[in-house]
Image: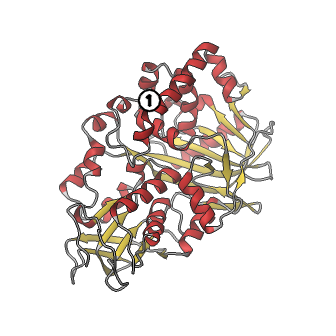
């Protein structure tokens, strides 16, 4: 075994395959697969990925309707998503520019562009100044945003985005953040801390968007082909400092125990808590985590009068309208197939969500004739709120990295999203494990 520092980092140059550490990655989504892919690039050969679902991809999940891919999770990538684009090039996953006629249905029922929406609510000088201030702030924070994770960010970003935007005079920009954050499952800008939106926009925002014509999940299936990925693998227990023959981690999966030297956790905290032998610090940190119930429904809808590819329903992106359709998207050439996105309140049921779905399409002149597919993400966008941030939540969480032979690469500490999770996992592996030569 190579020496391990107090942070659990390898500092080894020459190892044969038999002498190399055994590394378990739990979670076969963007973070877990990128972690394993990066470890392989670094020369590690004994890396096993466990994924509970029948296919790799995690919250990247593709359904097929009318012969075309329909995304039940992440939909597109952008020209700023360097890690995702690099992986796509490496594994040969095709991409196409996203051509979408996008509109926002304003409160008065008028379909407008994003620019016109903001112009209806704010004067030209306020709009221009807000845009200038926003890019000035991104430039100010750029070096900190480029670092892995949220630790060490300026405390002013801990405030809810609405409060931060008012203080920084960004309210015209906040109009766009409002409808996009709800439609994307991230919640209401009145309560979600600004650091999530600002870092996410700073890392990935671009008007140049790309779709995967074979489905976004195809990218991750291609990445998984080159790795040891075990799907339909139910991890029921992880015990650290309990392994035999010098392996400190025992993983119980599908009723069988496997011994490992290092553990990479790329699963939501809610799932991790069900199988991990949590320390007191881990248990306390996990207790602060909140999450969203986000639903995606693919349905056949007749009678919607306009031909837009994507429509945001502005009036439905306010807390009082929780559960209503925040956005719909026509993902195929068959214009009667829609993907609808709903952010549910804590007490709302699937039945109520289905009722609201039909009600919202009816209000636009449409009739839902058939539900083709449905996915509930009940652990979406794990994050913490302002009080926990003010008490150093992320500084404490990052201090866990490497302890008990464990590294965390989850949406909680990376920000829910394909690129943010993949980039965090890549950077963490490069920091934690030195290249191996044989």
Image vertical order of residue 423 relative to residue 391, above or below = below
Give the quarter of the image for residue 100.
Answer: top right
Name which residue lies at 47% across and 35% down.
198
> Does residue 421 show up?
yes
How many numbered dots are placed on residues in this image? 1
| Secondary structure beneath label 1 | helix
Point out the image quarter for the N terminus: bottom left
Residue 194 appears at what percent x and percent y?
Answer: 42, 33
In the picture, which quadrant includes the C terminus?
Answer: bottom left
Q: Which of the pair 87/248 is nearer the observer? A: 87
Residue to which mark 1 is pinned: 161
User: In the shown orientation, is residue 326 left or right of residue 427?
Assistant: right
| Residue 187 percent location from the top left of the image | 48, 38
Colour basis: secondary structure
Q: Quadrant of residue 364?
A: top right
Q: Residues within 10 Å of mark 1 (few under 14, many from 20)?
A: many
Q: Nearer the viewer, residue 389 or 204?
A: 204
Say whether residue 209 is left or right of residue 130: right
Q: Is residue 241 above or below residue 147?
A: below
Image spot of residue 56 (x, y percent): 53, 68
- In this rendering, the answer to whether 283 lies above or below 176 is below
Residue 192 in sight here: no
Give the left or right position of residue 346, taking residue 277 as reference: right
Front residue of 124/429: it is: 429
Residue 251: x, y in percent? 31, 74
The structure residue drawn at horizontal position 42% and vertical position 78%, both measured from the top left corner, is: 45
The vertical placement of 58 against 241, above or below, is above
Q: Quadrant of residue 249?
A: bottom left
């Amino acid at each position: 075994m190579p020496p391990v520092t107090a942070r659990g980092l390898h500092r080894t140059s020459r190892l044969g395959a038999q002498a190399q550490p055994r590394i378990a990655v739990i979670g076969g989504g963007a973070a877990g697969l990128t972690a394993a892919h990066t470890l392989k690039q670094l020369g590690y050969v004994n890396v096993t990925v466990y994924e509970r679902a029948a296919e790799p991809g995690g919250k990247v999940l593709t359904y097929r309707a009318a012969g075309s891919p329909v995304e039940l999770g992440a939909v597109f990538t952008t020209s700023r998503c360097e890690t995702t684009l690099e992986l796509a090039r490496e594994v040969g996953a095709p991409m196409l520019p996203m051509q979408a006629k996008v509109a926002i249905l304003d409160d008065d029922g008028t379909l407008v562009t994003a620019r016109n929406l903001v112009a209806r609510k704010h004067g030209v000088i306020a709009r221009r100044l807000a845009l200038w201030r926003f890019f000035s702030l991104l430039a100010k924070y750029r070096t900190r945003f480029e670092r892995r994770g949220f630790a060490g960010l300026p405390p002013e970003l801990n405030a809810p985005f609405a409060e931060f935007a008012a203080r920084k005079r960004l309210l015209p920009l906040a109009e766009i953040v409002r409808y996009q954050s709800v439609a994307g499952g991230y919640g209401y800008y009145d309560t979600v801390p600004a650091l999530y939106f600002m870092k996410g926009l700073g890392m990935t925002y671009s008007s140049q968007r790309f779709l995967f014509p074979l489905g976004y999940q195809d990218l991750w299936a291609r990445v998984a082909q080159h790795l040891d990925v075990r799907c339909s693998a139910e991890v029921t227990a992880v015990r650290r400092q309990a392994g035999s023959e010098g392996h400190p981690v025992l993983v119980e999966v599908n009723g069988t125990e496997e011994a490992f030297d290092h553990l990479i956790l790329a699963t939501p905290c809610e799932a991790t808590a069900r199988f991990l032998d949590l320390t007191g610090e881990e248990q306390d940190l996990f207790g602060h985590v909140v999450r969203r119930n986000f639903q995606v429904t693919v349905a056949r809808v007749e009678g919607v009068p306009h031909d837009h590819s994507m429509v945001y329903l502005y009036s439905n992106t306010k807390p009082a309208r929780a559960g209503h359709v925040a956005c719909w998207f026509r993902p195929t050439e068959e214009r009667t197939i829609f993907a609808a996105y709903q952010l549910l309140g804590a007490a709302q049921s699937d039945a109520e969500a289905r009722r609201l779905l039909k009600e919202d399409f009816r209000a636009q002149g449409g009739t839902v004739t058939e539900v083709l597919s449905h996915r509930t993400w009940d652990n979406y966008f794990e994050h913490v709120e302002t009080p926990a941030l003010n008490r150093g939540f992320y500084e404490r969480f990052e201090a866990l990295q490497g302890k008990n032979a464990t590294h965390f690469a989850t949406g909680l500490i990376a920000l829910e999203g394909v690129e943010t999770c993949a980039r965090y996992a890549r950077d963490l592996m490069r920091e934690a494990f030195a290249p191996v030569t044989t």
